[in-house]
Amino acid sequence: MGMSPQARLLRVLRDRGAQSKAELGDLVELSRSRVVAELDRMIELGLVEEAGLAESRGGRRPAVVRVASAVRFAGVNIGATSVDVAATDGELEVLEHVAEELDVREGPQRVLDRVVELVGKLRDQGHLPRLNGLGIGLPGPVSFRDGVPYAPPIMPGWDQYPVRDTLMRELGCPVLVDNDVNVMALGEKQAGVARNSDDLLFVKIGTGVGCGILVHGEVYRGANGSAGDIGHIQVDEDGPACGCGNLGCLEAFFSGAALARSAEAVARTGESPFLGMRLAERGTLAATDVADALAAGDPVALRLVREGGRHLGLVLAGLVSFFNPSLIVIGGGVAGIGHVLLAEIRSAVYRRSLPLATNNLPLVMSELGEDAGVIGAARMISDLVYAEPTR
């Protein structure tokens, strides 16, 4: 990683908070004079500020520096049916968070206009006196290099829409776009259970299934940006049809949408009286109804979740043998079915993977929930802003 001295210094200040110049030199392995020169330049750019004096280690009390308190990022997470916008400071602490229901199928103009309006609302409330950059996660494949969604299955009208360039023009600041799962993986690394892991898989089980891959603490996107699309790994060649046109994909067996379908099937046959009653009341079922049935002790719901967990565990076991991560984090809406799912995934992974790969391999639920996306989006853009001196 050929990171500039400025990027290394700013990342340490972002992730560890205020430091004395001497401590900074030790942490980034630069000479004292080089650290002082770099810091002076960044103070001039408004990225760093002096923050008083540290406790003495004997002798004079050293000056402490921190990321400038005026630095602000916006992190945006677009879901299938919602938009979340957060304002963070330069250390990526969330200062304010606004969210609302909005269907991504309303198209890019409508959704991005709303993003700009919500950023404006945060600005009016005083949370964004300036905007150093904005990061945004989208629920579909994204060409990271071009800042555009690429043939996203649940986003009609968005294919190759210039999301990055539109937002840069509207907001006048740097913008980066990625898919939501990569962004959530970064959020877990920044503020979640993955703080101390550099090689990890973040598995999101929402309407579909996706996986964010971090290698040496950085998102691994693959050659075209589609790495981690594990929802379309085939689990059974005679399996159910998947929305992508193939048979037996993981997503067809286990995802929010698949779980809702299975729930409706067992409700109709009367196998699950609980889900039968729920279907009669609501007219349709969602994955959350399976979670409720599970909580009520419904054995059929338990079976559905265990079968789903087994299929996901099968795919993860293959990934563990291939990638040897130090941690697997499970998140997304369906993660709400919690420990039953986790137990099933764990047993499948530990049974099928080589002992060396699963030795000390924690498999855990996300604790950040909805915040993972906005924090990760802010982290993604902070990496860019901190790496390139502001002109």
Image (tube, helix red, strand yellow):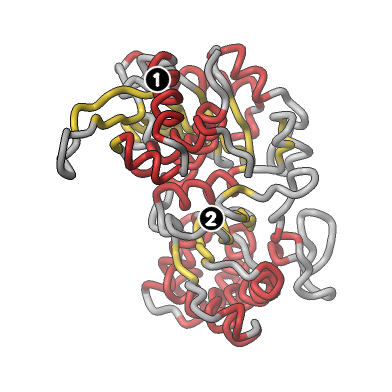
Examine the rendering and report whether any part of residue 55 can be seen: yes
Q: Disc 1 and disc 2: Cα gap in Å?
A: 64 Å
User: Is 72 left or right of 327, judged from the image as shown?
Assistant: left
Q: Amino acid at mark 1?
A: Asp
Q: Picture coordinates of residue 61 (x, y %)?
A: 17, 34
Compare residues 66 and 89 and report the one nearer the observer.
Answer: 66
Q: Name the element at disc 2.
A: loop
Compare residues 8 and 201 and report the one nearer the observer.
Answer: 8
Compare residues 145 and 115 and report the one nearer the observer.
Answer: 145
Say the numbered circle drawn on residue 308.
none
Dot in front, 1 or 2? 1
Examine the rendering and report whether any part of residue 72 can be seen: no
Quadrant where the N terminus is found in the figure: top right
Quadrant where the C terminus is found in the figure: top right
User: Is 311 left or right of 183, judged from the image as shown?
Assistant: right
Who's the residue at 55% across and 41% down the image?
Answer: 79
Say the numbered circle drawn on residue 283.
2
Q: Amino acid at mark 2?
A: Gly
Q: Picture coordinates of residue 200 (x, y %)?
A: 56, 61
Earlier sequence position, callout 1 versus callout 2: 1
Q: Picture coordinates of residue 100 (x, y %)?
A: 44, 33
